[in-house]
């Protein structure tokens, strides 16, 4: 099969760079266009951006000239959007209207009821929103989104528990990496030797997205599952990876052993299909009493699996555990690419 | 009034040093003896210990010769114990039997029903356990303990809410400083750029001590108040100060404003009595959306107040907030000295 | 004596805040005006700036209305300038022309031969440049500068050695704190767990300022002493305080003991005069083999002394040692205020 | 060619683990024995050690039973020694006497004039010491050592300059990672937000080993090249990788461009031979003004290359530059294995 040409919208930022690195040698997609803001368009990728990742600088595309983020300049079958929420508002619909399938990391359209908010292991069925979206909006293309990074990590652990038992209540304190704020992001004077008790809009996103991710499609629209979710989001001096301290009330009050078994046995659709970016194991269950640890575990599986440890009884909600996942891979670029792989494999796009 | 002569048991460690620094210029107490393990006894304080705190090294007592931790060598009216739980087991009762009032930072006797587990702002009435203790054990002296550092910070915020409304349920994730593990304690290879999901025995202590602190004395023995407490304890790369992410169910479901008012208006006994180590304000209520922050706020009031911020509705338990306190001052040396000040002021000892 | 009214130019930044905190309770100066950029002028100090220091927020002046940085609006006998180099170019001469004595932390006029580049312990005689400056420029007031923070720390240790022996050659690698870059300054993604090998223009400043500081006044103009200085400047993940790894060739090749004696015995003019901001001891000489340490030692003496340790033979230049000083106190706000104290005490201004 | 069976002496420590990981899939060597102290011998590798590295835990050898460090129990053609200097004193000669070629990371025998102190890119000719060693000591086997990690990084950059120009004088300040102190090593309370001005014996090692590495073999014994070296060694809060701030006097005073050219063109013997652990490029020359950076660059080439940047004129010694290398790979396990690869390829052993 020849590879599908794709554009990366907003290629110069931290998430854009991760898109480029992941797509540089992808079996299904091939980078045809890199776009940037007007300030950078026309420059080469090397001139316009300071590469901040390990591995081959610029994914080997340092000489590629950046295009403006306009569909007539950068139209491809598929686009990955690393745009901020503001610019995404107009740019992403313009591409969708032009027939492009936009896989977006921006928050702008996440909660629209005809836009898939998608984690392939969790709610692949939400691809079924696309016909409604195209019909309602008159687009030939589409917009598909991945959730907030903190939500993504959380629902990866909750989904198998929701399937097996039913999630009623979730209380989660996050300890989030500085990379979640982009670059330059968090000032070193603010975070070195410190923790910060507030991340703007973060708790609100987690509380509303979780039920949506674990919910259903009815009459072509997304319907959240009823559950109570409380998020308390903190920033900690960690480079990559969000740790989450989770308590959960499950129907039937399973034991920690039952919870561990369900998590370890989970083999959802992307793993069944063998999608290129799907980790072999979606949820890695740790038994060592002091694991998972973000610095030591988060890069495993290319950052695409999540890690659960210390599953134990919670006096308040029944079960508590430590959870860990990669915010800029699984929670951003990698998650979005996996969404596209799923959409192609399920013939929801490009079929 | 002449100052009461005191001993510091285990003066060379991190908590012992804080005892010495706080007592070096104390209006009520005067250091008469410093004790150490057999390995160090006979050396001067300067020889035996590497001073790790700011301010005058060795509290000006660098030339003092360390005594063995034996009551016949180091008897005083009052002793402050920075001993580890193991050595405390035999040494503290030996001093109590010899007539010394031992204010202990060790966990060994905390949960005995005739031993005050004391935070002066929270449960000063638990001094009423002392007659039972002396009678049961035949001691002329006594043992009084302060709780685990994480519990201490937590109950400082819960006590006024328990008085005003009644605490039913508490779910708390802690982000604890490395100083809580003593010296050398946490290896830099383990904690730099990392968070650790486990601190041995910590969750268990918080879950059992909290109800005890908020409880009563009945028939001369401690009776815990019934409440459900779940603690999830993590280590973070912070030097001093424990941050706590707290959700709480209060009777009558007060609003965040009502909670803030109660916290801000609280003026418990140590503040009424003007005890020397009592902070002017027991709970500092922050309104800035990104405060309190451990590195910036924890040293205020000599580390003796606790800090509450971001009081807001919790979808699960009703109220959630950010909490912060100093683990080695309020949660250890300072807390223990304040206990002694209360006991003297209330004529429970040395009257 | 009534206190001299002073203005703080650029009061909202990190250095401006340190000026305000140091001047809030100063025996010689009294804050009469706080200025800011046009964007902030007209707002209160509290509205316009996020206070980032310990101690009383806004130095108690949170309600003070910020003035524009114009001499007709904010004229005082003395001004402390925390302006950036760009704005300082026009604003500082405007104040000087209006009769204000401007003590500047900006690099703009440091190397002009009629502008004192001043560290009171090192070259108090450079106040003798002021008559030339006023005559040449036709100003009633004046501009006096303090050197780059890295230079300041270095010359504090070199000055007594230059007096006693003569400094011929200096090779210095700095490990500089993030606060030196202002706020937000260094991104946490750049510096956490990292060191950076470059600080723009820093090496050039140290190499040219050092000889100037240790030089003379001849015919009313500054003349640098001949010496060879090489600086290699790095950024490290430290909040406050610059560490310097120094090798030096001294005339007559003194021993490490002789060097330590000279440093310990040094009592320069500010200490003789007892200036309010002068530390009791200008250079603290450490003998412990693993001191000075920036986090543990830099706040001593309000950050106004420097620390020397590990004086030992250098196979290349003769003597090597570890050096440490506070970049935003001694190297910025505190240094500038000490300059003003010296100028007043020596009746070079305001007499 | 069948693989040569090797033993790892002291397999449970940090360096031992790196040996195991590097040898787990090595084309030339095959792990036949893992040894440990008496306390651990008899346990499985998994039981006796907490694996601290990324990648497959225990190099897939978790079930291997640890042997005592005795040649009659663990004899192989080749041994890699991760022993501490103390135990190495007796154990390494015992293995050498038994016919084993011991590639040691310990400091014990480094400076003996008949023991190769070897970096394959730098002084491969020092293998010529082995006949003298065997003759003098009556061993069938041999001991070959790699230098201190800080020296190794330094001589990798100096060797091509010594070949091309001649090194006369070196002045180097190191900023060393905490991993250099082993595990648990540096306490987090000591290093977080701090730098430490002293590393025991480190400066002495660098100053004596450098001339030896750049020296010759005469009459079967090592002869150091005459040069003056001064090292100032500091610890910084970095996990892996030593940064070095280097000034050097070269004969003929070459320009920075000439220095860069020589470094970039250097292709020493291991690269010519294509030894399995040799990096494709021995010295990577950076031109970006703020590189190399330890956290971003040190893992390149499996940690086996060193990085030079900011080559510029030094007012004191002529040339200064920033240098970076991996202390536990190139400076320990990887360096030692490369020594063995060289020795085999040159038929100095196992021929």
Image (cartoon, coloured by chain):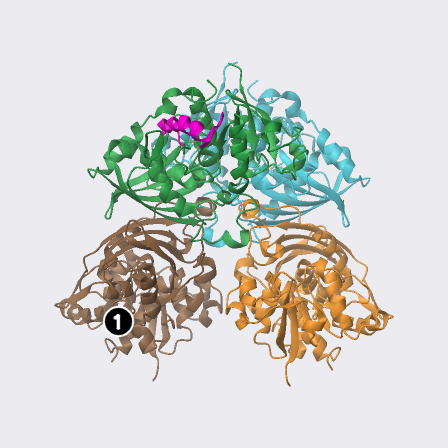
Chain colours: A green, B brown, C orange, D cyan
Where residue C96 appears, as percent x and y from the top left, is 76, 71
Q: Name the residue rendered at 79%, 65% in the picture.
A: C215
Say if residue D209 shows up in the picture: yes
Image quarter of residue C304: bottom right
Query: At which x and y percent is residue C117?
Result: 75, 65
Does the segment drawn in magenta span residue D168? no
User: Image height check: is D119 above or below C189?
Assistant: above
- As helix, strand or loop, the secondary structure at mark 1 comes to strand
Residue D240 in the image, given as x and y percentages of width and height: 53, 41
Q: Nearer the viewer, residue B277 or C182?
A: C182
Q: Quadrant of the N terminus of chain C?
A: bottom right
Q: Which region shows up in magenta?
A: A118-144
Give the left or right position of residue A68, taking residue A337 as reference: right
For the view shown, which residue lies furthest in the left direction? B219
For disc 1, the marked residue is B101
- Disc 1 crowd, CA 10 A, few/some/many (<14, 14-19, 20+): many
Q: Quadrant of residue C80?
A: bottom right
Q: Is residue D275 above or below residue A261?
A: above
Of the pair B49 and B227, the residue shown nearer to us: B227
């Amino acid at each position: 099969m020849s590879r599908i040409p794709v554009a990366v919208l907003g290629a110069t930022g931290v998430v854009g760079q991760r898109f480029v690195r992941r797509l540089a040698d992808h079996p299904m997609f091939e980078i045809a266009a890199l776009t940037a803001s007007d300030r950078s368009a026309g420059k080469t990728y090397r001139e316009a951006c300071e590469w901040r990742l390990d591995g081959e600088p610029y994914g080997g595309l340092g000489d590629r000239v950046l295009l403006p983020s306009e569909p007539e300049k950068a139209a491809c079958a598929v686009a990955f959007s690393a745009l901020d929420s503001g610019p995404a508002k107009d740019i992403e619909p313009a591409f969708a209207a032009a027939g492009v399938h936009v896989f977006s990391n921006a928050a702008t359209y996440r909660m629209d009821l005809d836009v898939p908010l998608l984690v392939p292991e969790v709610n692949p069925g939400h691809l079924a929103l696309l016909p409604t979206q195209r019909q309602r909006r008159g687009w030939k293309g589409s917009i598909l989104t991945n959730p907030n990074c903190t939500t993504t990590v959380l629902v990866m652990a909750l989904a198998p528990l929701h399937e097996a038992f039913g999630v009623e209540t979730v209380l989660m304190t996050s300890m989030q990496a500085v990379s979640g704020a982009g670059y330059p992001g968090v000032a070193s004077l603010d975070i070195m030797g410190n923790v910060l008790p507030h991340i703007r809009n973060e708790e609100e996103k987690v509380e509303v997205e979780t039920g949506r991710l674990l919910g259903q499609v009815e009459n072509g629209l997304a319907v959240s599952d009823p559950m109570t979710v409380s998020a308390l989001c903190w920033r900690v001096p960690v480079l990559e990876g969000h740790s989450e301290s989770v308590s959960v009330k499950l129907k039937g009050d399973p034991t920690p052993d039952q919870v561990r078994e369900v998590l370890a046995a989970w083999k959802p659709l992307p793993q069944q299909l063998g999608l290129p970016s799907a980790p072999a194991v979606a949820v890695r269950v740790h038994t060592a009493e002091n694991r998972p640890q973000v610095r030591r575990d988060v890069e495993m599986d290319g950052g695409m699996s999540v890690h659960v440890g210390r599953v134990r009884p919670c006096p308040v909600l029944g079960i508590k555990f430590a959870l860990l996942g990669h915010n800029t891979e699984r929670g951003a670029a990698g998650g979005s690419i996996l969404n596209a792989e799923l959409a192609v494999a399920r013939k929801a796009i490009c079929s």
